[in-house]
Image (cartoon, rainbow, N blue to C red):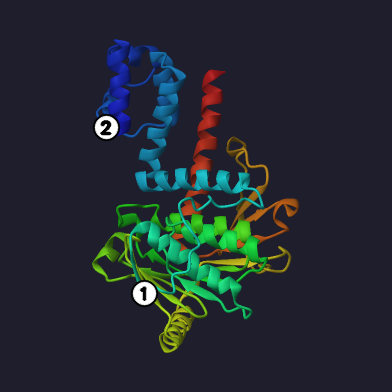
Amino acid sequence: MSEFSDFCSMLREESGMTIYHIAKVSGMERTALNRMLNGKRFPKYEDVELFCEVLRAGERDKEHLRELYLMEKMGRNHYENYIYIRNLLRELDQRENDAAFPDPSGTKNTDCREKSFVNGKREVRSMICSVLEGAYRQEKIQEMYTNFPVQETILFTVVECCEKKYRREIPLCHFHILNINPEKYYDVTCNLKVLRAALMWLFTKGESYIPYYTYSQLMLDDLELQFMPYYLVSASRVLLVSDDFRQGILLEDEDMVVFYRNRMEMIRRQMHHLVQTYPEKAGVWEDDTVLRTLDAPNLELQHLEVMLYGKGVVLSKDREVEQGRFVRITESSLYESFYNFFDYLSEMSEMEGVRGVTRN
């Protein structure tokens, strides 16, 4: 049995109709109908529409059954990716160019030079503010490095505030971990979540944010076994943070800072760019083939354009909104998720056609 067949059986029971009666009214074979309800046969979508019409199912039940049908046909993992990408595209489309990250409430931009160790989430957040403030106060601009997880928005929040306060940008190299096989990880959207954070930052602040990635079978939950797994490296200070962001160690010794910055540069050379950004579309991928262009009225995208190429996915916003910035995604698992997303839209379009014919 499956969720789809279980829901079909529930609708039949609630209707009070027998399999024999449904088969007679719909014209479906009784054996085929019985196998559909028992989860032993996956039906054509037109049979599902007939089934709903005969049972006089409500619109809400029809939509839920449609989702279950798609989930079973395409696979639960692909369906979860579809939902995540759909919401991501809507969020990117609606995001304003000058959108700000949430205000870091409860965080004071205090100077932590007198403390080399702090305990408590609020204290760690204050130390992050102090390190970033110090970087933006310096005359010489040197890139910063971090591997903070994407769910910790304090980094972007404080950077946003500092850029407005000091009217300058500092390149931020963000090192991400992507799961080598997200299909087998407990959260199939883990890599898409990394992409979401990167895209939000890129479409908001531009090329001063530089995301990199490497593959690993270890993910965020595994980092609790490590001592101070996260870091923020500025030109003059190094902040090491625990996995729960409740403890922080600040290093200000010049030799230690030089050591960490050299190490960061070595890591950077070994990693890959998560996305490629371009100011203009023309001439960037002339050797590539456009497979599909997103055409989904139900998504209601007004500013965002999505194109599936043979070698990557390209996202862009209207020139008036984002100054003609184009972002290209080539990482294999992310590309495959977008490829399946387009397949899902094709399936939905075909189903809409069947529904229209059935109603007429």
Q: Amino acid at mark 2?
A: Gly
Q: Residue at x 39, y 61 (%)?
A: 123
Q: In the visual, does 261 lie left or right of 117?
A: right
Q: Quadrant of the N terminus?
A: top left
Dot placed on the residue nearer the N-terminal end, 2 or 1: 2
Q: In the visual, does 178 lie left or right of 40?
A: right
- Can see residue 312? no
Q: Residue at x 65, y 66 (%)?
A: 166
Q: Is residue 286 above or below residue 263?
A: above
- Can see residue 326? yes
Q: Nearer the viewer, mark 2 or mark 1?
A: 1
Q: Quadrant of residue 356?
A: top right
Report x, y in % for residue 107. 46, 56
Q: Amino acid at mark 1?
A: Ser
Report x, y in % for residue 75. 36, 44
**Residue 223, numbered label:** none
In the rendered image, the residue lying farthest to the bottom is 255
Q: Residue at x 33, y 70 (%)?
A: 229
Callout 2–callout 1 Cβ contact below 8 Å: no
In the rendered image, the residue lying farthest to the front is 114
Mark 1 Cα within 10 Å, few/some/many (few <14, many 20+)? few
Which residue has dot 1 on it?
Answer: 116
Q: In the visual, does 118 lie left or right of 160?
A: left
Q: Label 1's element? A: loop
> How far, Cα to Cα, is label 2 from label 1?
62 Å
Q: Is residue 137 above or below residue 17?
A: below
Q: Quadrant of residue 31?
A: top left
Q: In the visual, does 79 lie left or right of 327?
A: left
**Residue 39, numbered label:** 2
**Closest to the observer: 264 or 227?**
227
Q: Label 2's element? A: loop
